[in-house]
């Protein structure tokens, strides 16, 4: 059901108090006014703290700097007059006992009158005593159809016109922006060149990054890593390559649903985060990074509001990849936290969305200690697949050395003994291999020469891999994977034999 349809239904059903959390105040007021007009040309009264009521000559300025008086106008109008009262920024006054009591009194009174009070606010903040009388109505960001209409209107007004693929790309680039920001960034391109040009789409992407930064919840992450930059993990790579076209219109016509996402569990430094970046680059999708810790805020209800905002923004930017790093640290022991249930509510909202979402948001979550995650997170249906990323085998370590040295010394790769490097670094993760190479570069640079295989081996000899310092934790992870609870990201060798080798230590 669209926002207009739901609002129309609630107004006709005489829901007395509606709360619409949105930053698009102007667009929301236009939609509300259009809905009121369809319902027998209802009167619309708009109030704010500075100017009081506006638009109606008889009541202009009434309730200026007096929110309680603003509510009294609702009672003052005849009981037979059909009207909608829009109160801007009213969330700031809800903690006042007089305001709270007045709203609850109005909730009783308006059940028998054709009047509705709509609170407009950039954030959702409802005190407990008003939770029963206020009905929250989500106001979504502009849809693709709405954006296309507005873009075509603005282009036509300036004598510009795009069609086909360029117009579709322009509209897709605008997804996730408010209508006001879309108008602003198009005007910027027009001001620069006299007309909006296809090359100005970069301005939209920059505006999108700015919008996401302002939420302080998501980061617009540049993804330059390629699938070929990942050493090993052949089974995981094959799984991803098969789904490369799953976001296309052809896949929809075939009947395929949008891919839901991946949970990558395993040992630290084995390439889980690198994989998330490579997925976005390979599929040509924007990469959004969520720090789950940013969802939690001090004010009551704000954490839940941020979670809903994150979901709304992610879906508005779809198709996209949503990368959630170290999800185990955010939701470990969710039931036992002493935070009045905030973590449980955020977790509940999040996993419900994971299970029920139909949008093209591909979620890539990484976890180092999957055993601390609630069982609900691991249930089939939240993610398409759960992959276990273990320590690389010898052949995978050789591939990892090749990836790093090809990037650092492409002209001199043949001078490095890759097979020896792989053999001499048992139990090393990808991150530890990279660190050994960097340390070898310091050795060579300090002696004014290029670094060699021996330098890398000397550096590696000084590194104690995590597989030895955290042997018990890694053993528990390996045994969890061996029990068949996750799919192996690597095809090389049997897992049981690799577990025995990795726990035995160096030869």
Image (spheres, rainbow, N blue to C red):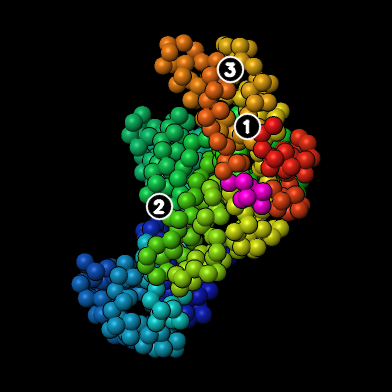
Residue 474 location, x and y as percent?
63, 47
Q: Earlier in the sequence, mark 2 or mark 1?
A: 2
> Is residue 473 found inside the magenta-colored segment of the image?
yes
Label 3: which residue?
A: 453
* Image quadrant where residue 356 sits: bottom right
N-term mark: 2 or 3: 2
Dot 1: what SS? loop
**Displayed quadrant of residue 108:** bottom left
Circle number at residue 230: 1
Asked whether residue 379 is drawn in magenta, I would say no
268, above or below 33, in the image: above
Residue found at x 70% / y 53%: 480
- Left or right of residue 68: residue 224: right
Q: Which residue is mark 2?
A: 215
Q: Nearer the viewer, residue 439 or 124?
A: 439
Taking the image as drawn, is residue 321 in sight?
no
Q: Residues within 10 Å of mark 2 (few under 14, many from 20)?
A: some
């Amino acid at each position: 059901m669209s926002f207009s349809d739901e609002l129309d239904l609630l107004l006709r059903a005489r829901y007395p108090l509606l709360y619409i959390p949105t930053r698009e105040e102007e667009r929301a007021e236009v939609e509300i006014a259009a809905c009121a007009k369809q319902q027998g040309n209802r009167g619309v009264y708009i109030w704010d703290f500075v100017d009081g009521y506006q638009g109606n000559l008889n009541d202009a300025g009434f309730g200026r700097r007096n929110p309680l008086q603003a509510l009294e106008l609702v009672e003052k109008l005849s009981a037979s007059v059909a009207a909608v009262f829009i109160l801007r920024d009213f969330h700031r006054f809800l903690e006042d006992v007089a305001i709270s009591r007045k709203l609850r009194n109005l909730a009783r009174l308006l059940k028998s009158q054709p009047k509705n009070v709509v609170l407009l606010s950039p954030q959702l903040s409802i005190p407990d005593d008003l939770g029963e009388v206020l009905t929250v109505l989500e106001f979504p960001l502009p849809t693709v159809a709405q954006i296309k209409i507005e873009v075509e209107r603005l282009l036509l007004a300036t004598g510009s016109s795009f069609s086909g693929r360029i117009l579709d790309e322009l509209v897709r680039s605008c997804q996730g922006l408010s209508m006001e920001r879309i108008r602003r960034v198009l005007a910027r391109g027009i001001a620069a060149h006299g007309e909006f040009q296809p090359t100005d789409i970069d301005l939209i992407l920059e505006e999108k990054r700015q919008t996401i930064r302002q939420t302080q919840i998501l980061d617009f992450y540049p993804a330059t890593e390629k699938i070929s930059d990942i050493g090993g993990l052949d089974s995981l790579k094959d799984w991803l390559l098969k789904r490369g076209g799953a976001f296309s219109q052809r896949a929809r016509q075939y009947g395929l649903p949008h891919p839901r996402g991946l949970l990558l569990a395993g040992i630290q430094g084995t390439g889980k985060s690198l994989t998330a970046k490579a997925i976005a680059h390979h599929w040509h999708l924007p990469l959004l990074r969520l720090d789950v810790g940013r969802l939690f805020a001090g004010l009551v209800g704000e954490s839940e509001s941020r979670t809903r905002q994150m979901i709304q923004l992610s879906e508005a930017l779809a198709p996209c990849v949503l990368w959630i790093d170290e999800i185990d640290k955010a939701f470990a022991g969710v039931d036992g936290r002493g935070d009045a249930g905030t973590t449980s509510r955020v977790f509940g909202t999040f996993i419900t969305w994971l299970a029920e979402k139909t949008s093209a948001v591909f979620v890539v979550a990484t976890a180092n200690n999957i055993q601390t995650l609630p069982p609900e997170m691991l249930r089939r249906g939240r993610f398409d697949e759960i992959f276990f990323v273990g320590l690389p085998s010898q052949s995978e370590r050789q591939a990892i050395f090749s990836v790093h040295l090809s990037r650092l010394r492409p002209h001199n790769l043949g001078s490095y003994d890759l097979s020896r490097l792989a053999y001499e670094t048992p139990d090393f993760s990808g991150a530890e291999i990279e660190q050994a190479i960097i340390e070898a570069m310091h050795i060579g640079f300090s002696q004014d020469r290029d670094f060699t295989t021996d330098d890398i081996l000397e550096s590696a000899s000084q590194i104690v891999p995590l597989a030895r310092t955290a042997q018990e934790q890694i053993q528990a992870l390996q045994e969890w994977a061996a029990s068949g609870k996750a799919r192996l990201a690597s095809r090389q060798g049997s897992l049981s034999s690799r577990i025995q080798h990795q726990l035995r230590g160096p030869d």
